[in-house]
Image: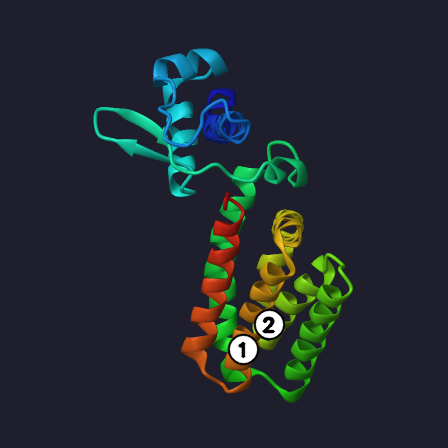
Amino acid sequence: MAAQKSAESKPFQDRKLSDLVYEKILEMIVSGQAPIGAKLPTEHKLSTLFEVSRPVLRQALKQLREDGVVVSRQGSGSFVQRRPDGAVLDFAPAGSIADIQRTFEFRSAVEGEAAFLAAQRRTDYDIANLRTAAEELDRCIREGELGVDADEMFHEAICTASGNPYFTAARTSMKTSILMGLNLTRNLSRAKSKERMDLVQREHFEILNAIVRADQGAARAAMRDHVENARKRVFEG
């Protein structure tokens, strides 16, 4: 039984290790130690440097490729493709960035379907709640506030409007990671310009307008685009 438990915990331990390695490589890139276009050290050197196995290192590199930060060239190794803003490491808790990116994948799937159903089932009360949240986000932008609570209220209202409480339950189970992601992306957007915040808000209104006019396909697409754009904005240089 003890041996079985140890075997079951290994994938989780490897994932946590790969997340730490992922962030260490990210720090190398953000700090300029590995500039855009530079080749990363070999897998052997990196695994020795971070004292991890090759499979753990490869998982970290795979995540960095999926995030568009590095690119692999057949037979040549991994090269830096993008240098994220250093503020990413300032606003995100240590060791959390890889998990935040996976949370965006979860949200895209779950909230896209919630928006699809919300466009079919929303009531006048639901629409009023969504508009209240959107107006609060407008106020936050005008007054230079971060707006994490209002952003969360908007997305929760969509799950409620779906008429299926399991969407709300699914988001609640991930709430800590979701709020970390919202805090990160809104801080990064606010650090850029008001135009960036306005762009994010236009995405919210695209979702809202699709739900109001009962366009299920457009609501799903707008939500998935919004969450995927948020994921990409984390690593814009």
Residue position for label 2: 158
Q: Residue at x 55, y 85 (%)?
A: 212
- The secondary element bearing badge 1 is classed as helix
User: Is residue 51 shown to the viewer in this render?
Assistant: no
In the rendered view, tell whether residue 219 sits above or below residue 166.
below
In this rendering, position of residue 121 left or right of residue 146: left
In this rendering, position of residue 229 left or right of residue 201: left
Would you say the residues marked 1 and 2 are in contact, meaning their CB atoms lie under 8 Å apart? yes
User: Is residue 119 shown to the viewer in this render?
Assistant: yes
Q: Which mark is residue 118?
A: 1
In this rendering, position of residue 91 left or right of residue 10: right
Residue 192 at what x, y percent from top left? Answer: 61, 51
Q: Quadrant of residue 27?
A: top right
Q: Quadrant of residue 63?
A: top left
Residue 185 at what x, y percent from top left? Answer: 61, 51
In the rendered view, tell whether residue 185 sits above or below residue 16.
below
Q: Residue at x 37, y 26 (%)?
A: 38
For the residues labelled 1 and 2, the Cα–Cα distance comes to 6 Å
